[in-house]
Amino acid sequence: MTSLITNTSAFAALQTLRSVGSKLHDTQTHVSTGVRVEKASDNAAYWSIATTMRSDRTAVSAVSDALGLAAAKADTAYEAMEQTGTVLSQIKAKLVAATEDGVDKSKVQDEIAQLVQQTVTIANSASFNGVNWLNTDVHDLYEADPKDRSASLVSSFVRNADGTVKVDMMSLDQIMTSLYNKEGGGILDGDPRSPLTIGGMRNENFFTTDITNDYSTTNVWPGGAAGKSFNFTAPVTFSNTDKITFDVTVDGDNPSQGLSSPLNPGFQTVGVTIDRALINSTLGRSDGTISDNVQMVKVLNAALAGTGASASWYTDQYGNVIPDRYQIQTLETSGLDGSQMQISNYSASTSLGDLGNVNTYGALGSVQTLYFTPFKIYRDVSLNFTFGVNDEATETHTIDRTTINSILGTTDGWINTADDMVTVLKTLITRPNTIIEANGSQILVRSDPLDDRLNGAKTEIGFRNMIVNIEPLPMSGLKAVDVEKNPGMVNAYLASVESMLGRVIDGAAILGSLKNRIEMQTEFANDLIDDISSGIGRLVDADMEVESSRLAALQTQQQLGVQALSIANSTPGSILKLFQ
């Protein structure tokens, strides 16, 4: 009986001691390693998550390193772009100086040439680890797909909800930063994307005749009021009996224009008389003399008052007054559709040059001639314009690569012929009874005269608000600037440099924004690494305070177990002594 009790006590003590020993081993491991989930058997779910997140932490750390490299590239390009802007400002100042009379343009050109070479040096030197965003080698820069001309930079490592992973990228379109491109097209190379006259829709700006690639935004063709010019040889003196009389009719419809009936015969016919009394009262004289064509115009306007016609001196196409000549034209204030100036029943006792019977009409309807030249719409170019006839509401349209290719069934954005241009305009312009047709290399845009009965200055047709999104463009490359060989092109060079400077500023702004984004992304990546590490710790790290307390308790339990086992083992001997 005693043996049975003793064996049972010893076994229980031994089991307890083994259990405590196992727990003590685990706790000692937790304390020594600081980890409570070290292998899958510790906690399969937490171990799996922790292992995955450790891998992700390594990937994010690699992203942080890549962002550091990207930051170095961006810093290099940004500093170089800012320096380029400074140099362009200096070139601009030299060009302004070259506009002054008496300036030695050869010396100015020497300074400009050195500054231009400095931009080349800056572009060549703006390289980090072999990567240069300012001196590029992109085939057909402006036609290349943006993804093919863009520099890619690692942005972030992403694990999606479905467990898939990817590396996000940020991109930099080098069209915004390329100063010099191997095939041309860089900011300082000159821009080839101008649509020129847009197939004749717009004209060169005659106010800046030395600057090419500078166009007017308006090309409207107004009609002209009916009128006739006359010769006049001064002076002319009217005696007390001299008199000129005639009748004036204005703004009747022209029977030869093929208009449908009824035709309006014009504003009421008004009789006109010119005599010595009229001349003296109009000019403040007493001798009845008209000394020149300016006085002749004053006398005629006094005589024509209330007729719907007026006189003016005659000018050439440049606005210069031609001596000994004047004209009489309708004022077109009658409210009628026609534009007519008719002098009839002319009677004169003296001569006012070749003034006499005449009947003239203005042109029917609105007509504009476009002088077509081929042009191309590049991938990222769009142009807007409004089209209108007379005082009607205008319509607004956009021409871009997609529009051209869709209308013509092409892919390259070219409008090569006047017939192609006619097809494009006919598709876009929706005004009823507008006739658009090719005439060789010219294009006629007009209102249908069967629909538009207006004549003369009441008619107007054309294009307004022609805006190209990429203009103004540099006329030529920076290396082509030569004020010594081309002194008449200084303003053109100045306009080009100003355009280049604007684009360099835009490029610097893009790079500055990229720098800021990289810095923010780097800070976020570092914070994310810390957060992932913290998250892993919450899953698998041991609570050292709890584990230490548990370790002390288990060590006490182990000591008590050893004592219990010792007591159990010594018990039989004690009992046997009782029987001795």
Image (cartoon, helix red, strand yellow):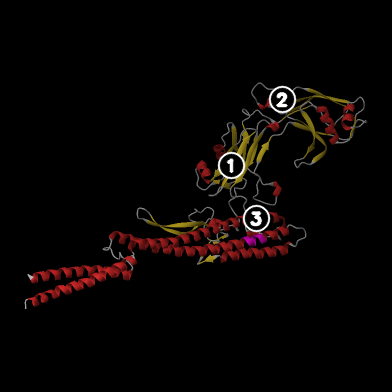
**Closer to the eye: label 3 or 2:** 3
Q: Secondary structure at mark 1?
A: helix
Q: Which x, y percent locates residue 370?
A: 63, 40
From where the camera sits, is residue 347 visible? no
User: Which residue is tagged 2?
Assistant: 252
Q: CA distance from mark 1 to mark 3?
A: 34 Å
User: Which residue is tagged 1?
Assistant: 418
Q: Which residue is more in the foreground, 384 or 245?
A: 384
What is the magenta range? 85-90
Q: Which x, y percent locates residue 549?
A: 31, 67
Amino acid type indicated by mark 2: Gly
Amino acid type indicated by mark 3: Glu
**Closer to the eye: label 1 or 2:** 2
Residue 400 versus residue 341 in the image, above or below: below
Q: Which residue is more in the foreground, 322 or 554?
A: 554
Q: Secondary structure at mark 3?
A: helix
Q: Secondary structure at mark 2?
A: loop
Around disc 3, counting alpha carbons within 10 Å, would you say few (fewer than 14), some (14 to 19), or many (20 or more)? some
Amino acid type indicated by mark 1: Ala
User: Which residue is tagged 3?
Assistant: 498
Q: CA distance from mark 3 to mark 2?
A: 54 Å
Give the mark, 3 or 2, whose residue is nearer the N terminus.
2
Main secondary structure along the magenta-highlighted residues: helix
The answer to if 541 sits in the magenta stretch is no
The answer to if 87 sits in the magenta stretch is yes
The circle drawn on residue 538 is: none
Give the mark, 1 or 3, whose residue is nearer the N terminus.
1
Q: Are marks 1 and 2 in contact (CB under 8 Å)?
A: no
